[in-house]
Each structure stands twice: as structure tokens, then as C-alpha cells.
Image (tube, rainbow, N blue to C red):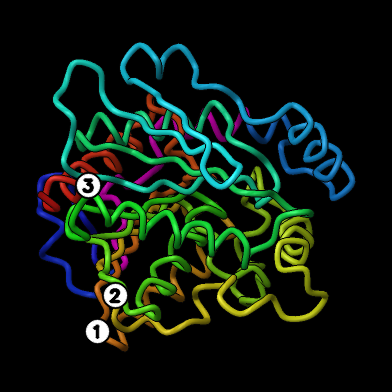
Amino acid sequence: MNAERADVPDGVVGSGARKVWAARWPSVPMRLSTWWLRRADRALTLDEALRRRDEAQARGGAPPPRSTLRRCRVDMEQWGGLPVYTVTVRGRTYPARTVIFLHGGGFTTPLQPQQWMLVSALARNGDVRVLVPTYALAPSGTHPEALGRMLQLYRRVLEDCDAADVMLAGESSGGGMAYALAQAIRDGGIAAPANLLLFSPWLDLELDNPEIKDVAGKDPILDVEVLRHLGREWTASAGRCGVGASPIDGDLLGLPPVDVFIGTNEVFIADCRRLSELARRLDVDVRVHEYRGGFHAFMYLSWLPETWHVMRIVRRRLRQAQ
């Protein structure tokens, strides 16, 4: 396994690489945050998860927090009956490059404050315009509807800029959807985006990788059975999840370069490692960046040294797309 140090360009590691941040142990802030999560017992039972889903959908998506609005301008327009947000850094010229960011939440939860913080970090680190589309959530919304909406949005973006100036990003379930979107773009013969940035992505909705059991007890946030239920709702299928919903089952050839950021204490890491191995066999440009002790979507927390390292790589990727 290749170890990536902060002072070594990550480009030296080839396709299908797994790279572990050089720190021998999780940082003290990471360990303290994990302790708090475990103490708070954040992993939910199915009944509790569905109750919180219903409450969150009734409230609607969270508006951008003040910390985001101090640094960024957020504009909103209705498109296809649902909001699409445009986020740009205040005081800077309108950027030529665009990131389409797909938010997570198990396909059931609307935008939350911590996701706005990640969007703000993308805009500021890359000096880019970030588009944040919303989509109909499960159980009323489904994968084919959401993917079709994202594909239409991508075509719309290409009317104003070159595909080489567009990147896809997403976190958690939104990370898996971003990968599925890249596959749909390729299959449709549409010009490919420059890169994909996936934060703690959910790549296989069935979660049947046998290696998941080795990490499930370490994850302080996610419950495998809850996730499987949400995945079945999203695909409206009681059997194998629908075609295209689990991008790891799709063809990896012909896709743009991919960077995956994942913590070693996430149930999703098993499939991220599987993706790395598949990419290595096919000589596909996928880099999986692992962070020791990292919990699900730890990069929400701007004070973690691990998050600083993630953003260094993100900044490099966004600037390479110029």
C-alpha cells in the first residue's frame, strides 16, 4: 500500500492507488470527535432513522448558515420544480469553472448545515462556481428520476461552458450518485467532466461486500441494515438494487479521473477499496485517499487536520482543471 505524505505530490501514485495519510494515528481532534460520536450513540435504529427522515423532510432543507453567507454568495432558482443553488466566493470575479455538487443524506434527508460548509470549502479552495441541485427524496423520489434530473442539469451547464471546466462532486449517497452520473454521461456520448471528487461515497446500495463486517462495529454513525432499507426505498425494488444505482457494478472504463476521500472507520471503505482494486486491474485513474480513524463524512469538520489534508488535494485537483 502506498503512503502519501503531505509534502509528496500525489500524482506520483498510479491508477487504482490506495493512499493512506502518513500520520501513524488519527489526530487528537479526530479521536476526540470519534469519542463524542460514540458517546452520543449516533448510529440509529431503522425506526428512529425513518422518524428522523420524516421530520427532516417536513422541515425542508436547511438554509445556508451564516458562516457560509459571510464568505460566499448563494443564489437560488427553481428548475424543474425544485431549487438549484449557485455558490460563489464573495469579492472574486465570476469563476470560469463549475463544480456540480450532489448532497448526501441516505437519499432521504434534504440539505443540512454541514453540507453547506463543505460546499463553501469547495468554492473557496478552488475559486469555482458550485451548483447544488436538489432532488426528490425517497420514498417518493427514486434513483431514475434523480439521475435523469442531474443529467439534464449537466447538459444545461455545458451550454455555457466547456466540459473540461466542469467537475462532479458528491458526499455519501450523493457521492455514489455523482459516480453514477459520470457513467450516464459516458453512456450517453456526452463530453466528460474533468474530474470527480467523492467524499465518503456510497458505491453499492446492497452493501453485500463481506469485508463490511470487519469495519461495521467501528463506524459510530452508520448502520448497515438501515442503509440497506434506504437503498431499497431509493430504487423502489425489493430485490437487487436497480441498474445504475450502485455505480461499482457498472463499467469503470472511459470515466474521468476520480478522487475518493474516506475514513478507515466507515462501512463504505470496503467498497472504496474494492473500487481501487477494480481500477488497478483495468488501469483506470482512481485514487482512494484513506484517513486513519476517520468516521463518515469527517471532512464536514473544518478543524480536523485530516480535513485540511483533504482540502489540499481538492485545491490541487480544482486548479489542475484550469
Q: Is residue 177 left or right of residue 158?
A: right
Q: Is residue 31 magenta?
A: yes
Question: Which residue is under mark 1?
Answer: 283
- Numbered disc 1: secondary structure: loop
Disc 3 designates what residue? 313
CA gap, disc 3 to disc 1? 21 Å
Residue 152, given in percent of the width and then of the height, sits at 45, 59
Mark 2 vs mark 3: which is more N-terminal?
2
Rendered residue at 59%/41% (across/down):
82
**In the rendered structure, are the residues bearing label 3 and label 1 in contact, judged by CB atoms less than 8 Å apart?**
no
Q: Name, please, the residue furthest toward the bottom.
A: 281
- Cα separation, mark 2 vs mark 3, equals 17 Å
User: Split into 4 quadrants, where in the image is the N terminus?
Assistant: bottom left
Which sits earlier in the primary sequence, circle 3 or circle 1?
1
Read off the magenta span.
Answer: 18-36
**Viewer-proximal residue among 168 and 22:** 168
- Residue shown at the point (23%, 37%) measured from the top left: 128
Circles 2 and 1: CB distance less than 8 Å?
A: yes
Mark 3 secondary-structure assignment: helix
Q: Position of residue 315 (x, y in %)?
A: 20, 41
Question: Which amino acid is tagged 2?
Answer: Gly
Residue identified by numbered label 2? 16
Q: Amino acid at mark 3?
A: Ile
